[in-house]
Every structure is written in C-alpha cells, then in structure tokens.
Amino acid sequence: MCSTNFKWRRLVFFLGLIAGATPAAWGVNVLTYHNDNARTGQNLNEQILTPASVGSTNFGKLFSYSVDGYVYTQPLVVTNVAIPGQGVHDVVYIATEHDSVYALDANSNLPALWQTSFINPAAGVTTATSDDVGCGDLVPEVGVTSTPVIDPVTQTIYVSAKTKEVTQTTTNFYFRLHALDLTTGAEKFGGPALILPTINGTGDGNDGAGHITFDALTQLNRAALALNNGVVYMGIASHCDNYPYHGWLITFTATNLQSQTFFNTTPNGGEGGIWQGGNGPAIDAAGNLYVMTGNGTFRTSTKCYGDSFLKLANSNSVLKVLDYFTPDNQSYLAAADLDLGSGGPVVLPDAAGSTLKRHLLVGSGKQGTIYLVNRDKMGHYNSINNKEIVQTLVSAIGGCFDTPAYFNNHLYYVGVGDVLKAFTITNAHISTKPSARGQDFFGFPGATPSVSANGNQDGIVWAVQTDAYDVSGPAILHAYAATNVAFEIYSSANAGTRDQLGGAVKFAVPTVANGKVYVGTQYGLSVFGLGVQSVTPNVAARPEISLEKKGRGHFLVRTAGTPGVSYVLQASTNLLTWVSLQTNSLAADVELKFEDADADKLPHRYYRVVKLP
C-alpha cells in the first residue's frame, strides 16, 4: 500500500492462462508460468470463455479436487495425454508444498491419474517446516514452491523440491530437480539431480577460502522454473531475509539433468535474491534471460547486483551478465527493504515499442514504480536520475509483488492496496495515468492478472483475490472486461456457497485454458467453467470496506457488512508480518479508536482490514 487512506474490498489475485503452445483445434497447453517465456500472461486462443458466457449465471465452479498440501504453484495443463491403462486425457498438473505432484483429469472429477511423492517419512524423509527455515512466509511446510515447467516434446515435467532428511545422528536439507514422465509420474533421465552449486567468492557465508556453497536450508526456489533451448533454469532467493543468502540462477541440461553453470548475484557481498513474486526468468526470442533482484550489495566492480534488472546470456554453458539497469535510488531501496525484485519482469512484444526502441522490458517492485527498459541498451546505473531508461512512472501502482499482463497494447497491473489498473503502451510509451481502473482494491499481496481472448476479441482480465490467506479465508475468483476493467464480469463471491473456493494461498497462480479455470488453494484445486446450475447473484456476499486515517491512532472504518461478521484491523511495516490491532463486528459505520504507538515513528506503516472467516 502506498497510503494509509484506502478503500478495501476483498479482491483479487491472478488467473493464469496459457499462450497458444498448440493449435486451438487441438486445445491449448499451459506449459510454464504466466503462459509463455516472455511472461506476458496472455492466452489468445480462448474461444469458449467470452465476456458474455462468463457473465451469465451458468458460469461457476464445476468441481474440486483434494490434494495433500498448499498449492503455491500455478497449475499446468497438457491436452491429449495418453495415460497407460487409463486412456487419453486432458491433464492438469499440480505440485504441493507436501512434496507431491498430481496428474488430474482437467475436465471431470475423476480419481487422480497418478501421484508422485518426494518424501518417505518411514525413512526419515519429510518436508521442511516453517520452524525449520525460521520463516512464516510459507506455511505450514516447505516442499514444492516454484511452478514447474513442461517439455511437451519429451513429455517431461521438471519440478524443484525441498526435503528434510533425518538419520539417527544428523538432519540435512536438500533441493533436488526432478524430471517426471507426464504419463506415469516416473523419474526420468537418471533423476533426481542434487542442487548443490559452489562458486568462487568472498561474500556472506563463504568458507574462508574464497568459496560459497549453496545452502539448501536458508535458500528458497520461489521463482518459477524456465525451459529454453534444452536448458532448465532455476532462480533462487531466501526464506524471509534469513542470512546468509544470495541470489542464484542455476542451470541443468534438460535431457540428462547434468548441472551446467551457476550465476550468483552477489558473490562478493550478500543478498540479492531472485523472488519475483513467483515469476520465472523472462526470456526473449534471442534466448537472453532477464531477472530482477532484491535488496543486496550493489557494486558492479565486484560483480554484485542488488536491486537490479539483469540481462544474461548462456554462452557455452556459462551464464554472463550482458547488460543491467539499477534504479537511481538503489541505496534507499536497500535501506528501506523496498526490494526491486519483489515483482517480476515481462519481455514485451515488439508491437509495444518504437522504431528506435523496439525491444522493451517492464517491471516494478515494492515501491510501486514502473520501469520501462530498452533491452538493447538497459542504462546501467546513474545515482542522479533514471534518464538512461525509456520511462519511469514513480509510484504508479501500490507495492508490487506480482507480474503484469500484456494484451492488445495494454499493461494490467495490480499493486498492494490498489485497484486493477490498465495502462496503454504504444510507441515505447506507457500512459502516465491509467486508461481504466477497477472498482475494487486489493490487499497484500496484490495480484498477477492474466488475459484470455480469441485473438484480439473477447478479452477478459482474470484475477484471484488471496489477501485472506493469513486467516485461512477463501480465495475469490474475479473476471473483468479487458476493454474496460471498471466492469466486473464475474465474482465467485456473488454466487453464494456454490462457487466458494478453499483457503487462499498467496502468490498461487491459477490457470485458464480450453473453457476451464483452475485455481489452487489450501489443500485443493477448484475447476470453473460453463454448465453449472444458475443461482441468483448475491452481491451483498462481498461487503465493501473503507479505512480512513483521521489522526494519530484514530481510524474510521465504514462497511456495509453483515451483522455479526467480524473484521480485524491490522498493521505492518513490511507487508508480510501483520499485527492485529482491533477486532469488531460491524453492521454499519463504526469508528475504531485505538493508539498505535508506531504509527508516526516508522517510515513505512501499512494498514488493512480483513474479514474473518
């Protein structure tokens, strides 16, 4: 949130779709995070879900699956998969924090086609717990966090999994890369491969002899896996800011899981994690990779790139920095914990550029400033200003923990404590003000929107509200008209109990493909589509809440909430750890009066109102 004066309406996260990896006649495959390696989030081959059909009362939740853990990953979809002994299916693949991967029928609620588990409790192999990693960011356990990636040619799904392995005398933690057969779930290519890189460096956690070794306990693979030209890429950050840690980009040969090369963002310093709100490395048509780093050492003379956009190339199995951009206020971002790399980058289509600036990259971080960068000349670092890049829109959105969507010369962004905003982008210029705004405000962590459309027609912006994750409230699925996001086509909260989702999971990215919407939750997967029994919309099911700061420690909360429903007012300094200040049952306008001693002392104090389940 950029201010303590905001309207709160329980809202949205993201509904991920797929880019047309296969011809529409054969169905659309969702093979990677946010639809394509550019991370645009657009599916231009959706012919079933239109604004008219989704806006009808016949669109809703068709069925749900139960799974064994939280689903932080985006569901992936492959059509026409031949499952031995079970026929041909369209399959949705789900990975959980309980270290399981499921293959589920994408169109009907059949028993799981297969399930593979990476743990064996009888042998002392389990998931790590939140207490183990010393961080409540992922709860209650840590297994598979990053979205897998699928190679349709070799029929392989690549998955990164964390395990805790206990013997009588030792406890160790491991990260492994698994390659599973899409049809059976069996391990392939001699896998799994242990992830344990070592590089030369004098930075945090070095061994005293100039070497830094990857620590599977403190490091976290949040960023989605990427696959390009036969290489699997894995971005690494940390659990919370538990030291020592670094940002890593690790590569493996896809066909044999042999470790190729490692890149460390701060080998002679510290931090610089690659979180990106779950987004994977963005990749352009030439095979160059783009990542955004978080707080950390910035000193290019020692190859340290905290709070930076990086362009890398994999040349002869060696990752090299080709170019970079670092904001002029990098030192302030680091000091104030305003990570640039909290959000993810998008490689924009050439249609968004100009003759001289055709190849563009866009991204934003916790400060909510949107950066438009020329991929051919990224600008490096200037402590005075950012004039070397194409455009800087200061505080254009709320704090960004997400990835924008691109569709038809528009960017769609959702920041924390902000509305869904559509910006036009033409001739290498983003409109300084949104061309359209949604009517609803998003809490933490905001949302990663995606767009489904049939070519450039029937565009829908999908999002899932997940800001009730910390009180186990339900996720809420929303759909908006891409031509004017002020018009909400659908909300699962307006269909009573028929469409209610399971508990929200922050950063979990749903998927839209082939007339279906897949939403991962706490211990479940819900599937939406056409053909449900019609219900009368229940608009009052989603009360509108506003929070206004009137003075020191004095807040006014207005709501049209249901009598007896409880709301809690919370405060935070980092948008991750929230402290409850006061709880009330609200039926009409109510003033909450209390003393928040830190309200005027801390430079970044955020507030929100949360509806309790």
Image (spheres, rainbow, N blue to C red):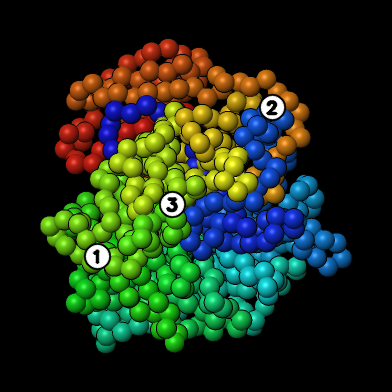
Earlier in the chain: of badge 1 and badge 3, it is 1
| Residue behind mark 1 | 379
Residue 563 in percent (x, y) is at 50, 14
Q: Depth check: 49 or 129 in front?
A: 49
Q: Residue furthest top?
A: 588
Residue for point 62% across, 67% down:
150
Is 75 placed left or right of 195 in the picture?
right
Circle 1: is it few (<14), some (14-19), or many (20+) Cα within 10 Å?
A: some
| Vertical placement of residue 259 versus 332, above or below | below
What amino acid type is highlighted by mark number 2? Thr
| Residue behind mark 2 | 57
Q: Are circles 1 and 3 on residues that touch, CB within 8 Å?
A: no
Residue 162 in percent (x, y) is at 52, 67
Q: Secondary structure at mark 1?
A: loop
| Residue behind mark 3 | 403
Q: Depth check: 123 or 348 in front?
A: 348
| Vertical placement of residue 422 versus 357, above or below | above
What amino acid type is highlighted by mark number 1? Gly
Q: What numbered label is drawn on residue 210? A: none
Residue for point 49% across, 42% down:
13
Task: Give the spatial CA distance, label 2 vs label 3.
Answer: 30 Å
Earlier in the chain: of badge 1 and badge 2, it is 2
Is 12 placed left or right of 264 in the picture?
right
Q: Quadrant of residue 584?
A: top left
Q: Secondary structure at mark 2?
A: loop
